[in-house]
Image (cartoon, helix red, strand yellow):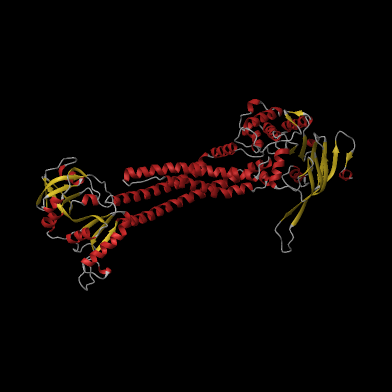
Amino acid sequence: MLSVIGLKLKQPNKWKNKMLITDLFQETYSALLANKARSGLTILGIVIGIGSVIAMISIGQGAQGSIKASIQSIGSNLVLVMPGFQRGVGVQVSAGRGSAQTLTQADADAIQNEITLAKAVAPEISRRYQITAKAKNTNTQVVGTVAVYPEVRNIQIDTGVFISDQNVLSLSKVAVLGPTTRDDLFGTGANPIGQTIRINRVDFKVIGVTKSKGGTGFGSQDDIIFVPLSTAQRFLAGNTYVTTISIEAVDQNSMTTLQQQINDLLMQRHNILNPQLADFQILNQQDIVQTASTVTDTMTILLASIAGISLIVGGIGIMNMMLTTVTERTREIGLRKAIGAKKKDISMQFLAESVMLTFLGGFTGIVLGWIISKAVTQFAGIATQVSFLAVILAFGVSAAIGIIFGYYPAQRAAGLNPIEALRYE
Amino acid sequence: MIECKKITKIYKSGPSTSSGQAIETWALKNVSFKVEDGEFVAIIGPSGSGKSTLMHILGCLDIPTSGEYFLDNQDVSKLSDDELADIRKNKIGFVFQSFNLLPRSTVLRNVVLPLVYTGVSRDEREKRAKIVLQNTGLEESHFYHLSNQLSGGEMQRVAIARALVNNPTLILADEPTGNLDSKTGEVVLETFQNLNKQGRTIILITHEKYIAEHAKRVISLKDGEIIEDVVSNRSEAKTAQQMEE
C-alpha cells in the first residue's frame, strides 16, 4: 500500500487502547492549573476541614495523655481510702463526702498487718496552712505522713532526705518541701536544707526537697510540704484522725481483690453492716484512669465531629466545583469521546481531578492541623499529641471524600452523549 | 471500505401523551451505499435532510435503528458505546466545523490528544504528531503555540492533523469550511484533496454545492433518502435505486 505521510495506510493500529497513568496525571494537573483561583478555594475548604479534625483530635489526645500521666504520677497500683459521709445514727442529713473524721492511724495499721495484698500503706493528714520563712510567706498544703509515702505515691527526693520512721516515732519537727514551695519561700533554686520554716506558729527544720513532678490539672504536687504524721497530728491538727490512707497493691491484678478486702476489714472495724452507710470510700487508681479516659474520649469525639462537619462542607464544595467544571467542559468531553475516549477514561479523568483536590487539601490540612496543635501547646499551654493514626485517618478521609463527592460529577461527564456534547454551546 | 445496507434511523421525541404514542421522526429511510477505499465523497443536502444523522452513524457516534453498517467488513451497527469508542479511536478521524480544539493547550498537545487514549508512548506520539502537522502545511514555529492564538485556517489544519494522527481508515469532515472565509476554506479543501491523492478515504458533509464539487463523488440527501449519487469524472449518474439492484 501507499506510504503516506510517514504513516502507512491500511496498517492496523496495534495498541493497548488504555490511558497511561502519567497522562491521567498530566490531564489532571493542567485542568487544575487552568482554574487556579477556583481550585485553590475548593482546596481551602478541605484544608480547613482536615486541619481542624487533626487539631481537635490532637488536642483531645493530648488532654487524655496529660490527665493519664498526672493520675499515674501519684503512684502505681494505688488504692486510696478516704473518709465518707459523716452520719449520725438514724440521721439522714450528711455533712458532705470526705468531711467525716472516721479514719485513724489504727485503721492504717490494721490494713498493714492483716491484708497481705497490701505492699505498703501510707496514712496521711493534710490541710492548708500559712507558712512563713524569714520575711516570705505562702499558703500551701501540709501533709503529715510516714516514711513509706514516697514509695507509695511515687515521690523522689531531689536534695536532702525524706521523713524517716525515726522522725515519726520521735515527733521530730522536720519538713520536706516541694520545689514550688521551696521557690516561694527561699527563692528559685536556693538550698533551704537546715533552714527553719514556721507552720501554724510551730518551727520546723527543712531536711529535704522533692523532685518536681510537673503536675497539671489535678493541682500541683510540687506546691506541698511534708512533715511526720505524728508531728502533724500532735502539733498541727490536735487529733489522731487521718485524711487519706494510700495503699500500694502488690501487683495490678490484685487491685480489685485488695479493694474488696480493705472494704470488708474497715466495715468490720467500724461496726457497719449496711454497705450503704459506710463512713469511708475506696478509690481504685485504675477506675480513676478509666473514668478520665471515658470523659476525654467523649470530648475528643465531640470535637472531631464538629470539625468533621466542616469536612463535609468542604466535600460539597468539591462536588459543586466538579459539576461546574463538567458543564463548562461539555464540548471538550464530547470531543474526547469522539476521538475514542471510553466512559471509563472520562470518569477516571474527573475522578482523578477531585481526588487530587482533596489529596492536596488533605496534605495541607495535616500540616495546618499540626501547626495549630503546636501553637495551642505553645500559647495556651495545653498538651497536644498529633498521632500517626489521626494523620492516616485524615488522609483516608480526604481520599474518600474525593471519591464520594467526585463520583457523581464524573459519572455525569462519562454519561454525556458525544453528539449532544459536541453541539453544546 | 464502507458499506451501508438499508440504514434507517428513527428518533422518538415528545412526552408520551394519554394515547401513549411518542412522535416519531424518520431521519434516515433505508439508505444504502458503498464507499471504496481512497474515494473522496461529499454528502450534500439541506438542513433536515438527514446528513448529520448519517455522519454520526458513519462516524460510529450513533447506531442505526435498523439496517447494517460495515466498516472494513466489520458490522459496527450493533456495538456497545465502549466498543464504538474503540472503533472511532482506531479507524475514524473527525474534522468539525467549529474545530473543537482545546483552547489552553498547545498545537502539539491538541494533535497528540487521540493517542493519549491508546497507551502509545510519549515519544512515539510526538513523532507522529509532528509528521502529520508538517503534512498539513503548518509552520513548525507554530507547534508550541496555544491553539487559541492561531487563525481560523491554521486551527482547521491543526484539527485535520489531529484527525490524521491515529492513521484512520476514514476521515469524516462536517462542514469543515463553515467557519472560514472562502479563501482559507479553499486552502483547507485543497488539503483534503492532497490527502485523498495520498490514498485517504474522505467523506465531506456540506450543504454548499460548490464545496461538494471538490469531491470526486457527490451523494445528495433529501428527507432522509438518497436522491442522487454522482461520480463527477464520469458522465453517467447513478441513482440510489440503480445502486440497490
Rendered image quadrant of residue B35: top right
Q: Decide which of B227, A90 is in the foreground and name it.
A: A90
Q: Is residue B195 rendered to the left or right of residue A233?
A: right
| Residue B209 shows in this picture | no
Q: Position of residue A115 (x, y in %)?
A: 24, 59
Residue extending farthest to the bottom is: A90
Taking the image as shown, residue A174 lies to the left or right of residue A407, namely left
Relative placement, left or right, of A181 versus B53 is: left
Q: Residue A348 placed where, x, y %?
A: 60, 44
Q: Give the percent coordinates (x, y) of residue A401.
A: 51, 48
Q: Quadrant of the C terminus of chain A?
A: top right
Q: Nearer the viewer, residue A274 or A58?
A: A274
Count the numbered circles shown: 0
Query: Relative to A7, is A214 above or below?
Result: below
Residue nearer the viewer, A325 or A210: A210
- Any part of residue B176 in sight: yes
Quarter residue B23 falls in: bottom right
Q: Give residue B89's quadrant in the image.
A: top right
Q: Determine the residue positioned at 39% across, 45% down.
A: A386
Q: Position of residue A280 (x, y in %)?
A: 24, 63
Whether A337 is drawn above or below B122: the answer is below
The quarter of the rendered structure image containing the N terminus of chain A is: top right
A358 sits to left or right of A114? right
